[in-house]
Image (tube, rainbow, N blue to C red):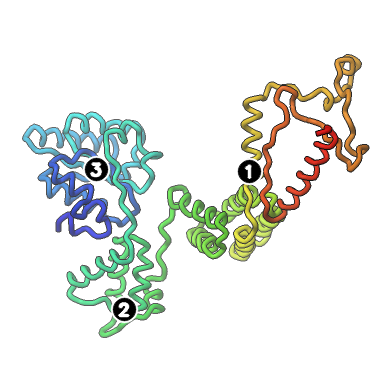
């Protein structure tokens, strides 16, 4: 097998792929392979070593410690002294702590090893900056269904027999693999073991065999953040069907429903705001309903809130206004409020003009005085710009009405 035989990573292994060009140049350099499980990271590392004549050494950060690293480095130095460089493949490299990651730097710099680290986590967050600065990050993509199908065809050629699946069941198996080539081959092995003489499984039969494969999802890592990001953007984009799909995936993966409830409340405040003031109320009620009902009954309440948010009119005016007000507060936080709106509990403060000239709005025509409440040195500011959608259309009318009254009373 050669590099060009790897499926699903043509941007790396194809005729004009990044790794193909590196091999042609004759200089590999250290690399970090970043991608989900079962996408060919280990296979590609082995092929690279084979096609460049490097000795291949593999360790796992899960099972290796400082003593193991020292042995590997010493063996690599010995090979280097005998004229052969080592490609050191480190699986799950993000599992090493900062000090252990730093130990790779000297052997990378002096050419003792070409480091190829594999990680399923974002290298920007999990790896030392010093290590990243000396290695090129190459992204491995999840395998699409066409690539998985090619893998299965190769497995059938190797086994000399077809998978005992009808067309629908085969399509289901491709989806169950979830972009993981290793998982696809494992599922194929399960099917072959379970099949009797001449037996062909339909989709229901396949699901009975494999039971159900756990989703590729780590609640504390990238899968978690990718799905909540997708859910948030689907809600913001007013697509209830996509939002429900990602919500169901998170439930299916075992995400804490109360975390989902909190994020839905954030969406209600950030993306709907006062365009529909009931959005936050309904989302909070859904969270309370889940507290009361538990799982799985309470999940329906969160699903209902999700649909409500996705179909509600959208406005980030409150979010934008609060952000602008926060910036102004940080920049002008030392300014004194105007004296006319401050209480004067002492004679001294009254003598200094505290409270002087304040007009009680309820005693004014239309219950509106039109006074300026900003610090004098700052002047009136405009942070909140309601959109012309949903309930904020009514708020805009009110603000425009008060603006007209203010202008009239200021004689403008």
- Tell me residue 329's x, y (percent): 66, 29
Which label was assigned to residue 165?
2
Quadrant for the N terminus in the image: bottom left
- Tell me residue 266's x, y (percent): 61, 48
Q: What crowding class fits label 1: few (fewer than 14 Cα within 10 Å), some (14-19), or many (20 or more)?
A: some
**For residue 202, above or below residue 380:** below
Name which quarter of the figure residue 327 lies in: top right
Whether pointer 2 and pointer 3 mark residues with C-beta atoms closer than 8 Å, the reply is: no
Query: Would residue 294 be seen by someone viewing this image from the given angle?
Result: no
**For residue 217, above or below residue 99:** below
Residue visible at 18% across and 56% down in the picture: 4
Who comes first in sequence, dot 2 or dot 1? 2
Judged left or right of residue 317, residue 77 is left
Residue receiving disc 1: 319
Who comes first in sequence, dot 1 or dot 3? 3
Q: What crowding class fits label 2: few (fewer than 14 Cα within 10 Å), some (14-19), or many (20 or more)?
A: many
Q: Nearer the viewer, residue 87 or 407?
A: 407
Marks 2/1: CA–CA distance: 53 Å
Comparing labels 2 and 1, the label whose residue is closer to the camera: 1
Quadrant for the C terminus in the image: top right
Residue receiving disc 3: 116
| Total residue callouts | 3
Residue farthest left in this picture:
82
Query: Would residue 236 be seen by someone viewing this image from the given angle?
Result: yes
């Amino acid at each position: 097998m050669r590099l060009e035989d790897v499926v699903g990573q043509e941007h790396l292994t194809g005729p004009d792929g990044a790794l193909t060009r590196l091999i042609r140049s004759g200089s590999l350099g250290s690399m970090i392979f970043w991608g989900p499980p079962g996408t060919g990271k280990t296979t590609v590392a082995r092929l690279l070593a084979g096609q460049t004549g490097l000795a291949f050494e593999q360790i796992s950060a899960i099972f290796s410690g400082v003593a193991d690293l020292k042995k590997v480095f010493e063996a690599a130095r010995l090979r280097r002294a005998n004229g052969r460089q080592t490609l050191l493949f480190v699986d799950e490299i993000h599992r090493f702590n900062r000090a252990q990651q730093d130990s790779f730097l000297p052997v990378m710099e002096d050419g003792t090893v070409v480091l190829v680290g594999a990680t399923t986590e974002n290298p920007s967050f999990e790896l030392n900056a010093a290590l990243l600065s000396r290695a090129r990050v190459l992204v491995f993509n999840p395998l699409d269904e066409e690539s998985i199908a090619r893998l299965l065809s190769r497995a059938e050629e190797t086994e000399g027999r077809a998978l005992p699946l009808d067309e629908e069941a085969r399509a289901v198996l491709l989806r169950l693999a979830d972009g993981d080539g290793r998982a696809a081959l494992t599922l194929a092995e399960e099917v072959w073991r379970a099949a009797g003489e001449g037996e062909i499984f339909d989709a229901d039969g396949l699901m009975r065999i494999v039971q159900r494969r756990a989703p590729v999802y780590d609640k504390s890592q990238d899968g978690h953040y990718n799905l909540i990001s997708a859910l948030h953007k689907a809600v913001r984009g007013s697509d209830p069907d996509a939002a429900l799909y990602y919500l169901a995936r998170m439930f299916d993966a075992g995400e804490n429903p109360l975390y989902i409830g909190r994020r839905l409340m954030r969406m209600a405040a950030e993306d709907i705001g006062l365009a529909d003031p009931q959005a936050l109320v309904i989302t909070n009620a859904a969270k309370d309903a889940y507290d009361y009902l538990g799982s799985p009954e309470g999940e329906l309440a969160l699903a209902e809130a999700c649909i409500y948010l996705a179909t509600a009119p959208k406005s980030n005016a409150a979010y934008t206004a609060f952000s602008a007000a926060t910036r102004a507060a940080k920049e002008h936080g030392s300014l004194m409020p105007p004296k006319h709106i401050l209480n004067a509990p002492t004679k001294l403060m009254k003598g200094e003009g505290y409270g002087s000239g304040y007009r009680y709005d309820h005693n004014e025509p239309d219950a509106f005085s039109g006074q300026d409440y900003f610090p004098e040195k700052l002047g009136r500011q405009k942070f909140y710009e309601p959109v012309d959608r949903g309930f904020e259309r009514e708020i805009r009318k009110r603000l425009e009405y008060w603006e007209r009254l203010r202008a009239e009373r200021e004689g403008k």
